[in-house]
Amino acid sequence: MSNLKPKKRVPAWAGQFYPLHPQRLSASIESYLGNAQPFENTGDIVGLIAPHAGYEYSGRVAAAGYRQIQGLDVSTVVVLAPSHVEIFPGVSIYNGEAYLTPLGSVAVDQEIARAITERSSSIYVSESGHRTNSDRAEHSLEVQLPFLQSVLKPGFKIVPMVIHDFDAHICENVGHAIVRSLPEKALIVASSDLYHGYSYDECIETDERTLAAIEKADPVSFIDGIHAGLFQACGAGPIAVLMEASRQLSADRVTIAARTNSADVTGIRSGWKVGYASVLFSRQSRD
């Protein structure tokens, strides 16, 4: 990839969304994972949706999903994340060689990134969505990496993809490009929270509708519902891409591993609320 630069993205949110000290971070994640129960008969998990709030809010829900892939031998993880602040067209793959976290360095899979970009005009290599030189740096991709480092066997690489501009056509196109480029031992992670707003009852009702739509795994109707305001997910683009890719990978099962919201976590019903869920996409085991 000719425009990939010999640089590494430093953590922008360590010490805020999750612990800065490596031992504290590991202990925190291990505690969350220890309280999460493994599921039986999950089949082959090809992808998952995980929340991206501060660990004290969404860490337990994230761990419920990540617990199901603990010990998995994966060579490449495509991490799909939304851009909350920066505006840019299409999908941006990080133009550096690695992402850093307090737990170490995670290399970018340059070969797979190159293959993906060659298969879609909507995907390009850029620093857009990955910048750390401001207090508005994106967090949604970064917060997934310590969990991946904690549950997967060492040595995996990532394709870090941040999405701002999405519609049904782009998501279908990006899903195709990913599936055609993936190695056999691969995983797709879509980073997303759910409801954002002030009403607890609306949070519960909206998340119910959103999760029911996710279970149907129809990316077009899901995006239509997002635009119509029926569903809420700040990572709607990543979720729709995961739906499309999972369909092409013959995933026939969608499992909600856990769900909650910030009001239930804190016990405070007033003020701003955010919904969280972990969702697994899997197919019948090939073993």
Image: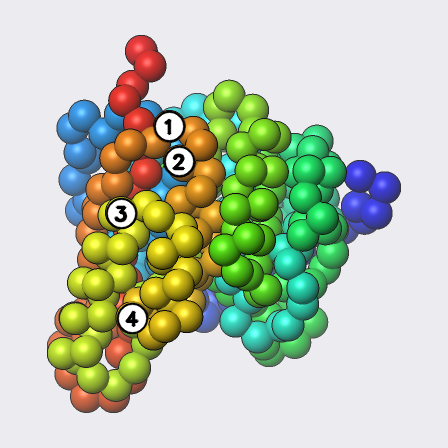
Give me the C-alpha separation between circle 2 and circle 4: 23 Å
Residue at 59% x, 30% y is 180
Residue closer to the observer: 47 or 141? 47
Give me the C-alpha separation between circle 3 and circle 1: 14 Å
Asked if the residues shown at circle 1 and circle 2 are in contact, with their CB atoms under 8 angstroms apart, the answer is yes
| Residue behind mark 1 | 250
- Of all residues, the one furthest to the top in this rendering is 287
Percent of width and height locating residue 187: 45, 34
The label shown at residue 230 is 4
Image-quadrant location for residue 208: bottom left
Residue closer to the observer: 109 or 198? 198
Q: Is residue 24 visible?
A: no
First along the sequence among labels 3 and 4: 3
Image-quadrant location for residue 284: top left
First along the sequence among labels 3 and 1: 3
Asked if the residues shown at circle 3 and circle 1 are in contact, with their CB atoms under 8 angstroms apart, the answer is no
| Secondary structure at numbered mark 4 | loop
| Residue behind mark 2 | 247
Q: Please, what is the three-letter code of the amino acid marked with disc 1?
A: Ser
First along the sequence among labels 2 and 4: 4
Q: Residues within 10 Å of mark 3 (few under 14, many from 20)?
A: some
| Residue behind mark 3 | 216
